[in-house]
Image: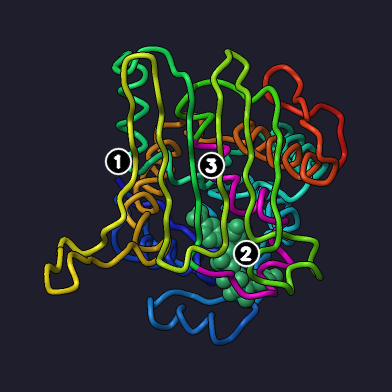
Amino acid sequence: MARIQVGVIGLGRMGAVHARHLAGSVAGARLVAVADVDPKRLALAEELGVKGYVEFRDMIASPDVEAIVVAGPTDQREAMLEAAIESGKPIFCEKPLAQTLDAVYRIKAAVEKRGAFLQLGFMRRFDPGYAAARKKIEEGAIGEVVGVYSMTRDPHLPPYDYIASSGGIFADLAIHDFDILRFLTGDEVASVYAIGGVYKYDRLHEYGDVDNAFCTLRFSRGAMGLVHGSRNAVYGYDVRAEVYGTEGSLRIGYDRETPLLVLDQRGASHDYVPYFFERFQNAYRLELEAFVDAVRRGAPPPVGVDDGEKALAIAVAAQRSLESGQPVPLDPGGVLRGEAT
Ligand SMILES: NC(=O)c1ccc[n+]([C@@H]2O[C@H](COP(=O)([O-])OP(=O)(O)OC[C@H]3O[C@@H](n4cnc5c(N)ncnc54)[C@H](O)[C@@H]3O)[C@@H](O)[C@H]2O)c1
């Protein structure tokens, strides 16, 4: 069967990972084009031997491009998705789906109208640890879920121009936690209470953002949840979760990157997972393989627009809670209907 010819929009930290994977290791796919407005980033086209575009709309329109990966800045998401959806070509889109719920509703309407295929990049669902935990929960291995705990601690702040376009700590970073807790529990969030602050990077005040936040969640079937999002884990990329049940517990994640423990006069030491590329390298490849597989089979996307909407609804509720100091309820089904952000 011919491989699906894919073009990638945006060759930054994330887009370059997707482009490299598609150029070499994603079964059933072939990278044919990339687009970026930054000439330095676009140099990757030559390295990978594919066509490079400055204007992403030209890449979308190319007959050689059969499927599109959208990995540009979050504040350009809607414009990029609008053009990609209109083309009718299958789309793999980085998280978050959009920065506001209003934008999500517009994207959702366009997807439905065009009958578009849109898969969202919540890669943790494809990580072997998280996937195995969900299976265990479904099999009843830990009984009824009592509480879930998920943390995303980045080792440092991304560049300030990224912060400016990111949508804030909840929509940009903790959204991975919100999605994976929905995935693990198979349940929707009913209410959110968030606290947070600027503990390390004073300049974040200018952006109305925080570098650390905690959210407590109540799920609709009664389970409790706790999320810690941080931009300041000085020791490394610390992404873990625990699902605690009436009959046991599941711990997901690891901290030592190299399988080496050094034992000397100072005691025992080892390195730490450096960043997201290393921790989720496999998951980034597997989510693209799932994309190709679903497109070929004519199956629905394994992670869809509704997942993007519900994860963003939790993020929006968390932001409102942070600002108001009050818990924020979500509507049944984990949505925030008719609410602008
Ligand atoms: N799934 C994950 O783990 C993960 C990790 C990091 C980032 N992301 C997401 O990926 C997206 C990109 O993040 P990033 O860290 O790669 O950002 P980045 O700033 O490193 O890269 C963005 C790239 O888009 C390019 N760009 C800007 N405007 C463009 C345009 N009009 N046309 C084409 N290219 C354009 C920039 O030149 C840059 O190369 C964000 O939405 C972010 O939330 C996801």
Q: CA distance from mark 1 to mark 3?
A: 16 Å
Secondary element at image label 3: helix
Residue 71: quarter of image: bottom right
* Dot placed on the residue nearer the N-terminal end, 2 or 1: 2
Which residue is tagged 1?
128
Residue 199 numbered tag: none
Q: Cβ of disc 2 within 8 Å of ligand 1?
A: yes
| Residue type beneath disc 1 | Pro
Question: What is the residue that sits farthest to the front in this orientation?
Answer: 265
Q: Which residue occupies 68% across, 65% down?
A: 57
Which residue is tagged 3?
177
| Residue type beneath disc 3 | Asp
Q: Which residue occupies 40% across, 38% down?
A: 296
Q: Which residue occupies 40% across, 34% down?
A: 242
Residue 337, percent from left and from top? 81, 26
* Dot placed on the residue nearer the N-terminal end, 1 or 3: 1
Residue 223 vs residue 70, the one in the foreground: 223
Give the extent of the magenta segment: 156-180
